[in-house]
Image (cartoon, rainbow, N blue to C red):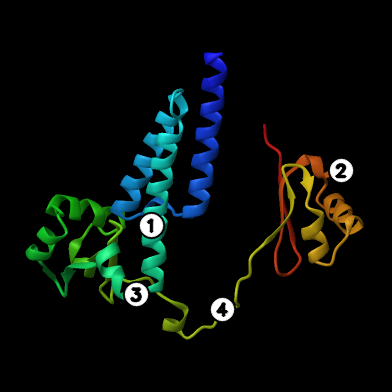
Amino acid sequence: MELIKVILTSLFSAVSLFAIAKIIGHKQMAQLDFFDYITGITIGSIAAELATELESPWKPFIAMVIYGAVSLGLTITAHKFPKTRKFINGTPTVIMNNGKIYRKNMKKAKLELSEFMVMCRQEGYFNINDIETAIFEYNGRLTILPVSTKRPVEPKDINITPEQEMMNTEVIMDGRILHENLKRLGFNLEWLEKQLKAQHYTSAKEIYLGVCDKDNKLSLFAVEE
């Protein structure tokens, strides 16, 4: 009987955690601010407690709902009332500008000089003299504006206008034909079979990935063991 209770509370915990995560919304780790991060850890810890709470599972469940509601409420508030974003999310901090590193701002951001150097290298800047401006964002990421002579060359710099690239469309994935995508491109199975034969394949099952570009050129990647 106790085993059944554990199974049921574990399922209840998993479903509750999934539902709360869907309601709060999806964010990448890099997009999480400090409060989002600790809230996620806390909700996960409560969900683990809920999975083994056999006597009163509603208590950790209510706690999960409250934490989720607070997180969602802050997100909605920040979206609807822009003036609150500074208080809720924090503000970016200029760490370096025009060749000067601001020690006061480093302390404000609670960022050590060694950490700053590591973050610069992670962004691909091993020479600090290549950096014009460095901003420590509220989510803990470092945004860098390189000096003009070190930034990547853009097409407009050499007076060329490249053709706009478009997204490729998957027509075969893991040996399965994606009929809706094929139809959206205006092609049918007969066209696909001809393309397969032209590239010396006999069946879509031999293809791990097949993508079609804007020029209707089909690129096929065979299944490799």
Comparing marks 4 and 3, which lies closer to the viewer? 3
Q: Which residue does the numbered mark 4 point to in the structure image?
A: 162
Element at label 1? helix
Residues marked 3 and 2 touching at CB (< 8 Å): no
- Disc 2 to disc 4, how far (Cα)? 37 Å
Which callout, 1 or 4, points at the residue further toward the start of the chain?
Answer: 1
Badge 3 local density, few (<14 within 10 Å), some, or many (20+)?
few
- Where residue 196 appears, as percent x and y from the top left, is 83, 50
Circle 1 is placed at which residue position?
A: 31
Residue positioned 18% across, 66% down in the render:
129
In this view, the residue farthest toward the right is 190
Numbered disc in front, either 3 or 1 = 3
Which residue is label 3 attached to? 82
N-term mark: 3 or 2: 3
Which amino acid type is shown beneath numbered disc 1?
Gln
Q: Is residue 64 left or right of residue 138?
A: right
**Residue drawn 14% across the image and 50% down it:** 114
Marks 4 and 3, the one that precedes in the sequence: 3
Q: CA distance from mark 1 to mark 2?
A: 45 Å
Q: Is residue 18 left or right of residue 102?
A: right
Is residue 94 visible in the rendered image? The answer is yes
Question: Which one is in front, 127 or 20?
Answer: 20
Residue 207 lies in quadrant: top right
Q: Are marks 3 and 1 in contact (CB under 8 Å)?
A: no
Characterize the local packing of mark 2: few (<14), some (14-19) or many (20 or more) Cα atoms within 10 angstroms: some
- Identify residue for label 2: 202
Q: Position of residue 150 (x, y in %)?
A: 29, 71
Look at the numbered disc 3 and give the secondary structure of its residue. helix
